[in-house]
Image (tube, rainbow, N blue to C red):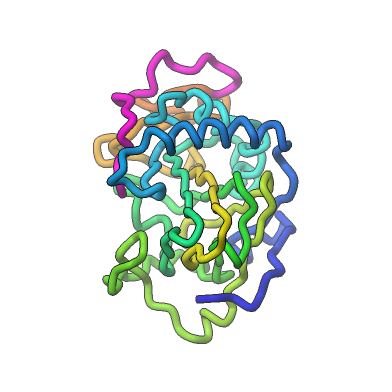
Amino acid sequence: MMSEQTSANEDPGLYAAEGYCVQRGLFSPAELAALRRSLERMIEELPADRRLESLVEPHIRAVDWRTWLELARDERLLDAAGGALGSSELLLLSTHLLVKQPRDGLALCWHQDNTYWPGVTGVDVCTIWLAIDDSDLGNGCMQVIPRTHSGYPELEMVATEGGDLLGVRVEVSPGMEADAVALELDAGDLSIHDSFVIHGSEENESSRRRAGLTLRYANAASVKVDLDKHRKPVYYVRGAGESLEMGQRDISAAKPLPEDPGVHRSRRFDSL
């Protein structure tokens, strides 16, 4: 999968055509240090039989879940998601800390994000990948195949031979793979990609950790979520309430965070 291309699209105006873009320098060293402290507490508490890639839904499952839920409604992230989706109303569907340990972090084979969201109907969904550590080809950064979201094809997943995080992949031709672009990010940068764009990453064979937070946002006006199938809270994070639906948690416009995150908090994060 290793890409020879490291020049990523940094023009949000090309997002619709390319299916992704990168934004630089959004978060300060002090902000990142606070996130790393929270992450490191989670790592210390993780049972020995769990991999670091299993830190799913920190905004509802971490002991200090408020840190991550507050981050999820940060105006910089909402501006990035709202611009990509062309929407003034946004839902937060999920989050996931993807941490690759030095010389141990697993690969993610070519895949599409939309495949993993039962209960979500609609195509106006994007994933923000916020770099908590520097992320480059050396430590297994994300790679995307531009324009593969065109027409919103839902590709069949096939089983891998194991040794990767997801255990499944989508078929990619040599020509498609040759077009892959590496999204090399400094800590504090972010990338944003369409939920149908094919993407993946290599193992981390370096001596450096690679940590990033993914946040999945949807256009509240065009995407419907079956809460029973989704099996986690859906937060309405931006808008005046026009598309807010029953059962969604409204934390838009600096409303107070809920007293509880909507699930039983646990030091034992769910695996994928």
Q: Is residue 117 magenta?
A: no
Task: Determine which quarter of the picture holds residue 60.
Answer: top left
Please state if 108 lies on the left or on the right of 81 as rendered.
left
Q: Position of residue 16 (x, y in %)?
A: 62, 59
Q: Nearer the viewer, residue 266 or 23?
A: 266
Q: Nearer the viewer, residue 221 or 158?
A: 158
| Residue 45 vertical position relative to residue 209 in the rendered view, above or below | above
- Could you tell me which residue is drawn at 61 percent across and 30 percent down? 34
Tell me the magenta residue range. 252-272
- Could you tell me which residue is drawn at 36 percent across and 37 percent down? 46
Magenta stretch: dominant secondary structure: loop
Q: Position of residue 41 (x, y in %)?
A: 47, 31
Can I make out residue 192 in this image?
yes
Q: How many marks?
A: 0
Residue at the limit of the structure toward the bottom, as seen here: 174
Q: Nearer the viewer, residue 14 or 221?
A: 14
- Could you tell me which residue is drawn at 61 percent across and 36 percent down? 88
Q: Is residue 266 magenta?
A: yes
| Residue 52 vertical position relative to residue 5 in the rendered view, above or below | above
Q: Position of residue 97 (x, y in %)?
A: 47, 44
Can I make out residue 199 in this image?
no
Task: Determine which quarter of the picture holds residue 75.
Answer: top right
- Could you tell me which residue is drawn at 72 percent across and 37 percent down? 29
Q: Position of residue 92 (x, y in %)?
A: 47, 36
